[in-house]
Amino acid sequence: MKRLITILILCTACTKEINDLGYRVYTIPKDEHSSGSYINHPTNSKISFDFILDESAIYTSEIPENQHDVNKIYGMSDFGLRHQKYSIRLGWRYINGEIELCWLRHEDGRHSSATIRTIEPNESYNAIINITTFYYEIVIDGDTTLVRRRPKGNWGLVRRYYLYPYFGGNEFAPHDIRIQIRE
């Protein structure tokens, strides 16, 4: 019973504003990592969404090496396990005056990432993350990037959960950061 009450409190405490264009506006508050806790499970292995990063995605890390960390926009866990073990996400970082769009994969507890392309603030982009047998397929405005997926024996229907906006690794958001997502 306590668990059910806790879940209900979490769900009602997390408000997500929906703007006139149908985007949910997620805000990562200054000095926080997360935009909130949300419980939601995809119904299949593919998510399609539009997203907008505004000028709040531009930042300077306190520790210069952390500027290369990938902040998270949206994604999902994989293999029915914790997302720190297996997951795929779309993310961004601000490097050399540009917002780089990246993929971030957790595989067997280790993370890796790479740049997909640069993007402009206040522009809408269409994204698809599709989990296939041996690849995570990431499509941005029609351009496809394949990221290797190594199945570990979990075949068939796998329970996944969505991963929502998150800033940093070991640093917190230097100011409020807004990310708009429309499914």
Image: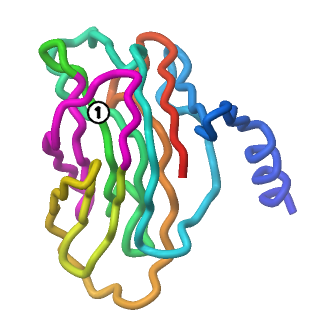
Q: In screen coordinates, is 34 left or right of 22? A: left
Whether 161 is among the magenta residues is no
Q: Residue at x 40, y 35 (%)?
A: 124
- Pointer 1 residue: 92
Q: Is the N terminus in the top left, top right, bottom left or bottom right quadrant?
A: bottom right
**In terms of depth relative to the viewer, which is nearer, 1 or 21?**
21
Q: Position of residue 37 (x, y in %)?
A: 62, 43
Query: Crowdedness of circle 1 by 10 Å Cα count: few (<14), some, many (20+)?
Result: many
Is 139 left, or right, of 50 in this rendering? left
Residue 17 percent across, percent down from the top left: 69, 32
Q: Position of residue 22 (x, y in %)?
A: 63, 40
Q: Compared with residue 146, is residue 123 higher up or lower down, i.e. above or below? A: above
Give the residue at x 33% y 27%. Answer: 170
**Horizontally, is 121 left or right of 105 in the view?**
right
Q: 130 above or below 99?
A: below
Element on which disc 1 rests: strand
Q: Residue type at mark 1: give it.
A: Trp
**Is 119 colored magenta in this rendering?**
yes
Examine the rendered structure and indicate whether residue 14 appears above or below residue 103. Answer: above
**Outermost bottom residue:** 156
**What range of the chain is rendered magenta?**
99-126
* Residue occupying the point 34% across, 85% down: 154
Secondary structure mostly seen in magenta is strand
* Residue 44 placement (x, y as % from top left): 48, 75
Q: What's the colour scheme?
A: rainbow
